[in-house]
Image (cartoon, rainbow, N blue to C red):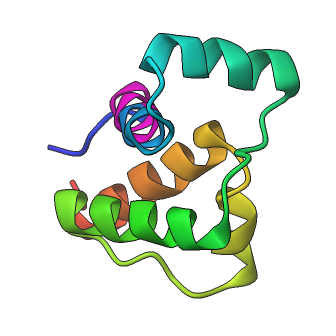
């Protein structure tokens, strides 16, 4: 069964919170207050991509679409969910 967007967003927030030694809920509030952009280096984001690829059995393409998706938690989660849907057709 494919994960929901909310489940993927929670995982992303947990990973980001671990990286920044922050509470996930505080991080969510901070991101909402500052806008949707994820203020993390590309190295950190690559680590998150690898973690999510392994967790959900997907491959995030090396493309402009994927790069744009990494700008926010929501768009990143949407990309992962769409890739899991593509791998698990009904």
Q: Image check: 70 left or right of 89?
A: right
In this rendering, would 63 be left or right of 12? right
Secondary structure mostly seen in the magenta stretch: helix
Question: What residue do we see at 43% from left, 41% from top?
Answer: 12
The single residue placed furthest to the front in the displayed view is 21
Is the residue 17 above or below the residue 61 in the image? above
Which percent across, then down, holds residue 49?
Answer: 43, 66
Whether 58 is among the magenta residues is no
Task: Determine the residue located farthest toward the right in the rendered image.
Answer: 34
Residue 24 against residue 63 in the figure, above or below: above
Report the quarter where the N terminus lies. Answer: top left
Image: 31 above or below 41: above
Taking the spot 51% from the left edge, 83% from the top edge, the residue there is: 61
Q: Quadrant of residue 6?
A: top left
Residue 12 within the segment the image draws in magenta: yes
Q: Position of residue 31 (x, y in %)?
A: 71, 25
- The residue lying at 74 percent from left, 47 percent from top is 39
Comparing 23 with 8, the one in front is 23
Q: In the visual, does 74 lie left or right of 18?
A: right
Task: From the top left corner, tell me how far across and down residue 60 is, in percent.
Answer: 45, 75
Residue closest to the eye, 60 or 1: 60
Quadrant assignment, res 86:
bottom left
The number of callouts visible is: 0
Q: Residue at left 21%, top 67%?
A: 54
Q: In the rendered structure, which segment of residues is drawn in magenta?
A: 6-13
Quarter occupied by the C terminus: bottom left
């Amino acid at each position: 069964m494919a994960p929901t967007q909310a489940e993927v967003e929670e995982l992303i927030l947990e990973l980001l919170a671990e990286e920044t030694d922050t509470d996930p809920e505080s991080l969510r509030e901070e991101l909402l207050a500052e806008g949707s952009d994820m203020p993390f280096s590309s190295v950190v984001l690559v680590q998150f991509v690898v973690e999510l690829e392994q967790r959900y059995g997907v491959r995030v393409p090396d493309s402009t679409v994927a790069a744009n998706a990494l700008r926010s938690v929501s768009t990143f989660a949407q990309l992962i969910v769409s890739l899991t849907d593509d791998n698990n057709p009904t």
